[in-house]
């Protein structure tokens, strides 16, 4: 049988389509596979945070729990400074790098982490003095330094989307520390000091596993200087954003403690613990967006990068919404299951906190996308707007309304942050992001 020209062309086109469909299917499967392990890894991390938070809220006195909430909020803030100059540049530059290149960047990142220990000694002493727990200064320092070390080793694996590999070290750290805290609580030995010691040792154990998995490579002085310039260039606006974000912390939990007392800080911590299950989803989404969007942009351009981010963001919000609905419909049950009768009467505040959590999730997605696109000045602008809103409105609201003012200030700050993303949404529409489907290698 002899084919006509049009028939031959149609069959050739169909064959090409079949050949092209296989890589697309493999690409989608690989993306779902990475997404599954990404959410699983972050799920272990944040499930641990949720569980030990509940353990501490039920075991420590309200004053001690309030002190611990402030300690952890400051440790997380200092971790964000480290992330700006170490973890974030490692993620952006490590995502498209080959294995040898990643190992060299990882070695440089560990050197930069060591340099940052000096300022953290001062911050640990100041924090312990302010909270009148000066004997804990050493444990605060150990916790934050080893926490940052493990975040660096973890980021080296996650940046190339090796989420399954990262799960080993993360599981050892986070499951281990919860097990130890449960034992200490059962024996009546759980205290702020023992909690910080447990967290420090667990972080070191997880870091050692992940250093072995990633591997190190020699780095020359010239390479170290070049990496230092690159890391500084990429991280400076993120660092400034986090410095500005200090205003949100001061106008929130710190002002709550000053104006209303540690009991109200404990209430704020209790509310935050109930929405902690959203953290694994949002953190994993941020990691997926940062790594996946950076790679998509490098290989396929901005349009595919934005569409990739949209898929991950949609998946994240689909996972977060059921929890938020449950907390909104049955707040009394949620508070009772978590804390018994300890924080009863916070139902209406919890509903408002759920609203803030939903808004904050969208803000985090937007910031992750801007980070992947290296639009760090825009992140800084967003942070400035949110902090100004929190300071100008938050301090008087906290002073007059206590815990209610704290929650309303957080809601208004999140709304202000969302408004700054309007130009990003316009750019997404220009690239038909909401109608097209990404195709990744």
Image (cartoon, rainbow, N blue to C red):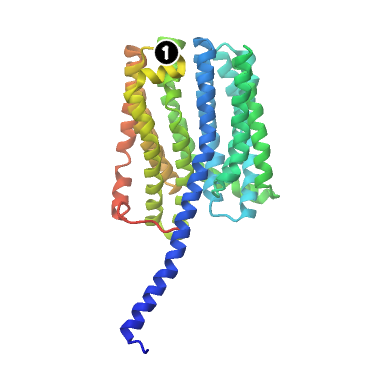
Task: Please tell me which residue is depicted at 60% across the width and 21% down the height of the picture.
Answer: 181
Reply above or below: 128 against 163.
Answer: above
Q: Say whether residue 405 is visible.
A: no
Pick the front one: 47 or 100: 47
Reply above or below: 225 against 348.
Answer: below
- Farthest residue, direction bottom: 2
Q: Position of residue 246 (x, y in %)?
A: 45, 27
Pick the front one: 166 or 63: 166
Q: Position of residue 152 (x, y in %)?
A: 59, 39
Q: Is residue 321 left or right of residue 238?
A: left
Q: Is residue 171 left or right of residue 323?
A: right
Q: Where on the picture, by quarter, is residue 432?
A: bottom left
Q: Is residue 313 left or right of residue 168?
A: left
Pick the front one: 407 or 310: 310
Task: Please tell me which residue is depicted at 34% across the width and 78% down the height of the picture.
Answer: 10
Q: Which residue is mark 1?
A: 343
Mark 1 neighbour density, 10 Å: few (under 14) some (14–19) many (20 or more): some
* Badge 1 element: loop
Q: Position of residue 307 (x, y in %)?
A: 37, 52
Numbered-mark total: 1
Q: Position of residue 388 (x, y in %)?
A: 35, 28
Question: Quadrant location of the N terminus?
Answer: bottom left
Q: Where on the picture, by quarter, is residue 259?
A: top left
Reply above or below: 294 against 179.
Answer: below
């Amino acid at each position: 049988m002899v084919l006509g020209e049009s028939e031959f062309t149609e069959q050739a086109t169909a064959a090409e389509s079949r050949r092209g469909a296989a890589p697309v299917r493999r690409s989608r499967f690989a993306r779902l596979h990475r997404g599954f392990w990404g959410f699983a890894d972050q799920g272990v991390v944040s499930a641990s945070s949720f569980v030990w938070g509940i353990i501490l809220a039920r075991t420590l006195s309200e004053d001690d729990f309030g002190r611990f909430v402030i300690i952890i909020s400051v440790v997380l803030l200092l971790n964000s400074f480290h992330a700006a100059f170490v973890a974030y540049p490692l993620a952006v530059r490590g995502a498209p790098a080959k294995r040898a290149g990643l190992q060299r960047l990882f070695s440089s990142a560990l050197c930069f982490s060591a340099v940052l220990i000096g300022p953290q000694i001062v911050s640990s002493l100041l924090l312990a003095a302010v909270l009148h727990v000066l004997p804990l200064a050493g444990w605060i320092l150990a916790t934050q330094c080893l926490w940052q070390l493990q975040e660096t080793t973890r980021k080296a694996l996650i940046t190339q989307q090796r989420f399954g590999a990262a799960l080993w070290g993360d599981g050892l750290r986070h499951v281990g520390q919860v097990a130890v805290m449960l034992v200490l609580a059962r024996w009546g030995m759980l205290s702020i000091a023992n909690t910080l010691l447990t967290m420090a040792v667990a972080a070191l154990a997880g870091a050692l596993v992940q250093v072995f998995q990633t591997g190190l490579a020699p780095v020359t002085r010239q390479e170290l200087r070049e990496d230092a310039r690159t890391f500084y260039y990429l991280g400076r606006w993120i660092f400034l954003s986090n410095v500005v974000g200090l205003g949100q912390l001061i106008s929130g939990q710190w002002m709550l403690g000053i104006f209303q007392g540690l009991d109200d800080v404990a209430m704020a911590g209790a509310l935050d613990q109930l929405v902690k299950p959203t953290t694994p989803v949002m953190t994993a989404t941020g990691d997926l967006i940062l790594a996946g969007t950076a790679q998509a942009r490098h290989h396929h351009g901005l349009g595919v990068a934005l569409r990739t981010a949209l898929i991950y963001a949609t998946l994240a919000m689909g996972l977060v919404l059921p929890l938020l609905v449950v907390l909104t419909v049955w707040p009394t049950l949620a508070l009772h299951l978590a804390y018994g009768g300890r924080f009863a009467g916070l139902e209406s505040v919890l509903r408002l906190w759920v609203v803030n959590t939903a808004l904050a999730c969208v803000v985090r997605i937007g910031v992750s996308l801007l980070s992947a696109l290296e639009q760090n000045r825009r992140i800084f602008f967003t942070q400035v707007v949110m902090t100004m809103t929190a300071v100008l409105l938050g301090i008087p609201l906290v002073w007059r309304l206590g815990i209610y003012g704290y929650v309303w200030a957080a809601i208004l700050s999140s709304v202000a942050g969302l408004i700054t993303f309007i130009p990003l949404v316009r750019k997404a529409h220009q690239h038909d992001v909401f109608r097209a489907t990404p195709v990744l290698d």
